[in-house]
Structures are given as C-alpha cells and as structure tokens.
Image: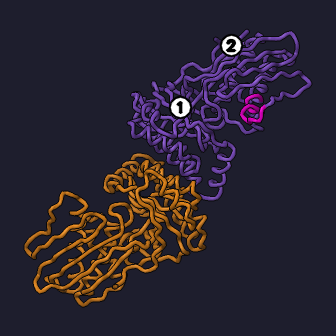
Chain colours: A purple, B orange
Amino acid sequence: MATASAPGKVYLFGEHAVVYGEPAVPCAIERRARAEVTERDDDHVRIDTADLGLEGFVAEYGPESAPTVEAPDSLLEAGLAYIDAAVREARDAADAPDAGLNVSVESDIPLGAGLGSSAAVVVATVAAAAHELGLDLDSRDVAERAYRAERDVQEGEASRADTFASATGGAVRVEGDDCRSLEAPELPFVVGYDGGSGNTGELVAGVRRLREEYGFAADTVSAIGDLVRDGEHALAEGDVEELGRLMDFNHGLLEALGVSARSLDAMVWAARQAGAHGAKLTGAGGGGCIVALDPTEQTETALDLTAECEQVFRAELATDGVRLE
Amino acid sequence: MATASAPGKVYLFGEHAVVYGEPAVPCAIERRARAEVTERDDDHVRIDTADLGLEGFVAEYGPESAPTVEAPDSLLEAGLAYIDAAVREARDAADAPDAGLNVSVESDIPLGAGLGSSAAVVVATVAAAAHELGLDLDSRDVAERAYRAERDVQEGEASRADTFASATGGAVRVEGDDCRSLEAPELPFVVGYDGGSGNTGELVAGVRRLREEYGFAADTVSAIGDLVRDGEHALAEGDVEELGRLMDFNHGLLEALGVSARSLDAMVWAARQAGAHGAKLTGAGGGGCIVALDPTEQTETALDLTAECEQVFRAELATDGVRLE
C-alpha cells in the first residue's frame, strides 16, 4: 500500500490573465488531498472516495468497461474522471498499463471553489499509484503527469499552474508552459468560502468575449500581468503589506472582468474592514473562495460573522508539495 | 424675487480618470436644487437654507464681516461657502458688487453623495441672483460663473463637469476644459444611496498615489478613458444594454483604484441581480450613491430590500438644465 498527499492552492495573483500568457502566482496551502493505493491481483480499478468534501462515491471497472458512477452530480463524474486519468498516467509511467489498483481518495479541500482540489487529488493519486507500482517520481515528474491527466479530462484546456503548485509546494510562478518555484516569506493566508462554486468554463469564456470586444478589457488583462510582475518583487522582499495592496487591486480588475460575485465581494470587504493586508477572490470566481492575508485572528472572526461566508479557515503556505506518507 | 432650479448629476462613466485628462460623461438627473433670491435695500447678504438635505442654516453678513454659521458640521460650512461664492459671481456678472440679497436655497439632492449637490446649488444661485440683479445669463455663462465659484471654494481644484452638466442638462462630455452636450436616449436611472459620503480629497489623493506608484494603475486610469470613448458610441446609438455592460466594467476599474466601499458594492450587486442593465458607483466613491440603468421596477425593489441602501429613487435624465421658475 502506498499513500501520498498533495496540497491545494490559492492564487496570490494572476488567475484568468494567465490564460493569455501573463504570469500568475499560485501558492500551495496547507489543505491536502490524500490518495491511498494498493495493487490488486486482477486488472480492475476500484475507486473509493471516502470524503471529497461531497458525499463520496465508489466505482469499480475492468479494462473493457468505462468508469461510471451512479450519481447525478457532475462533481462526482468529474472527480471520477480525474482519478481515472491519474491512474492511467501512473500506470503509463510505471510501464504497467494493466495493473489493477484499489484507489482510496479523501480531501479536505472544498471542491470547485478555486482551491485546486482536482489538481491536488490528481497529484496525490499519480504519486501514490506510481509508488505502489514500484516507481518513485520526483515532484516535477508528478507535476507533468498530473498536468497531462488534467489536460485529458479538460479536453486539452488545462493550466500547468494548479498541478505544478500542488506537486512542488510553496509559491510558484507560471507563465505559459514555464513553471518555477519562488522564494516566499511566511504568508498568513485566511480563506473564506461561500459554499458555492462558479462555472469555470463560462467565466473563462466571459473574459474572452470582453477581451475580444473591448481594447480596454485587453488592457485590463495586461494590467493584471504587470501587477503580477510587481507582486513578484514584493514576494522576494517579503513585503506582506505590499502584497495585500496588490491583492486588493487585482480583485478590482477581476471584478471589472466580470468574474466576481456578491458573496465574494462581501467576504473581501469583511476581510479588509477587519484589517487584513488585502483580499481577493481566488480561482475562476463567480462564487467559491476568497483569500486574505492577515497574521491576526481578526479576518477569521469577521468572516465568521459574515452571512455570505459558509466556512473560514487559516491555511498557511504549504512548503511541502506532494509527499509519500 | 427670482427663482431658479438646477439638476444634480450622476456619472455615467469616467469619474476619477477625468482628473488626468481622460473624458467623462456626467448626466443631469431630475433631482433639483432651488434658489430664491430677493434684492435688499442694504448691502447685506442673508442666506437661508430651508432644506439642503441636512438641518439647514441661516447666516447674515455685511460687506465687512466674513460669512459664518454657528454649526460644527463641515457640510454646513461648505454649503455656506458655495452659496457665498455663487452670490459674488452673480454680483460680479451684474456689475453690482454691493447689491444686498436675501438668498433662500433648498435641494432634494443628497449632500456629498456623488450627485453634484453643491454644483446644483451654485448653478441655481448664480442664475437666480443674476436674474434678480437684472441680468439673464445663458446656460453656458451660468456654467462658467458656477465653475469659478466652485474653484474659489475648492482652492483651485474644481472640475467643470458638475457645473456644466447642471447648467446645461442632459448628457455631457467633459475632457479637460472642453465641455459639450451629447445626444442621449432616455436613460432609466435608478439611484441607491447608502446615507453616507466619502472624503473626496482623500479618495482623489489615493488614486493619485496608486497611479504614481504603479504602471498598471496608470493603465487602469487610461482603460477608463478608453471605456468612456466606447461609451460615447453606445450613447449615440441608444444602446442601453451596452451602456450597462460598460457601467459594470467601469465599476470594477474604480474598485481596483480603491474608491469603492462595501455598501456601494452591495448596492451594485443588488441592482445587477435584479436585472439592471448595469450598475456602478457615481462620483468620488468611498460611500454615497450608486447608479443603475433599469427601465423596470426590479432594481428599486431590490435596493429597497438591501440593508446597505438607505434611500432609493428613480431619476430620469434631466433634459433641462438650469431654469428660471
């Protein structure tokens, strides 16, 4: 039996603009997905999700049958597809395409909320399954395999950002296919979650329409890229207050691009009024999570008292990425 | 006795960026200030504000005494200064520097809330006082005199936007010192007011700091200018839905520049979720008013039910500017 865990992430800066070749800075956070993999005697795969932040599912399938799960929830189907793709990548890496595996996955990262839950599940599954099949992948190899799995599931439309940040941990700079780790100070992240999620495809398409129709919208996307470049300096200097100011500005530019939501704005304001250095939505937007920087407990308290916030938790920067447990 | 009224305004687009030479489009709205002026036998001025949206004040002063009012409220002092400056401009225009006048002013425009209340008071006072002194100024002359009065009070820092829109009515394009009227369709404005006001000086200074420190903030100001130019086309074509989309985007850029507020964002979202074509803060921000475009009653209903909204009213585009009554 092999077990691996991998962290979720927040976007310190740059979501959406990253689609157009601008740099972005995702940061791994200490909320993890865990995969436990055991080789079987036959060539079947059994997937069991004890706790994926939803009710979980069990699916078992052979080499001739497509993986299906009896549940109407599209999150379930997506979860199954991601884990199945991760298993295939691990089998491929280990040159064991017919290996039977029991895979058990659990996660304490809210699903579809901008925290990179699917990437963390895929990264943990790839690492654990490969290890169980006798192959220890380094974090960059796991990142590459996990990226391919996500790209498969998302029909060619995947960013390397989430899987790279989850595999390597820490703060990461992503620009196109170029991913690298950044030095970062301690980042006192506080996450507020509205209990919902946005439709990533629609949100990305909305930004695309605005960008194609209006020169000022294309300039807004470019402004996010420039902000990220300034943010890299602030990160290198460990200037948390400056990072907060830039997060506030980044949130406004995302709001201009139509990807915020009433609940996200309410949580962002609660954090700012509580004295956070800054706050912004994280991920595709439209609902889900905001991230604030606050070393004190004030933001957690304020978010707890905010009607739009269903869950609030502290999530320090995860310096470890994927790890065998 | 002479009576004149003048409308307040909302910014359809472009506040803050107008400070840096970008165009802006203020629109006069059907909420008015009224000034009633009667010549006196002596050389004193008596100012009586029955209802300025605050408790009002009375002040009387001679040529040797400075106008003072016994009230701690800075809004009162500001109101007195504006009316005094308007009286001086009217006396100067009529070549009657020592004329005694009783001036009574009332307004149904919330003060300091981004609706151009001071400009409307000044415009109405200049027109009524000049008329009482035998001089009928046309709207452009009233705009010029009112601008000078505001500039005096604000120590050189005045925009021509508010006074021009109030004097001429309708939709207006302002770029630097160049002001002109625009053709406009019927604009179904709905105004939400949080009962407060922002500190214009601090808000303008905050944008200045951001713009000087960050290239992307300067680009954000320029993006507002480009948005305004697109907005002029939408206005010319009477495309109210497009105007709404541009208002939404403009609000996000203002939020990025740090001039929104929790209450303003809450009202903007209430309007959008009610089906308004678009919504944004109007004026300096930090508190005060938002403006939405909605031909239906939905936005008024939604704002009525929004805790952060203290007052909501419909305010169609005012095609009349200053007028003698």
Q: Residues within 10 Å of mark 2 (few under 14, many from 20)?
A: many
Residue A243, x across and y down, in percent: 44, 36
> Does residue A79 lie above or below B10 as drawn?
above
Sequence-wise, the earlier of marks 2 and 1 is 2
- Quadrant for residue A168, please give it: top right
Horizontally, residue B298 falls left or right of residue B306, namely right
**Disc number placed over residue A223 in the picture, else none:** none
> Does residue B181 lie above or below A253 as drawn?
below
Main secondary structure found in the magenta portion: helix
Quickly name the residue at label 1.
Answer: A311
Q: Residue at x 50, y 42 (%)?
A: A227
Horizontally, residue B81 falls left or right of residue B137, namely left
Q: Which residues are magenta?
A: A71-80
Q: Is residue A197 within the magenta segment? A: no
Query: What kind of element bears circle 2?
Result: strand
Quickly name the residue at label 2.
Answer: A3
Q: Amino acid at mark 1?
A: Gln
- Quadrant for residue B298, please give it: bottom right
Q: Residue at x 75, y 17 (%)?
A: A103
Residue A106, x across and y down, in percent: 67, 21
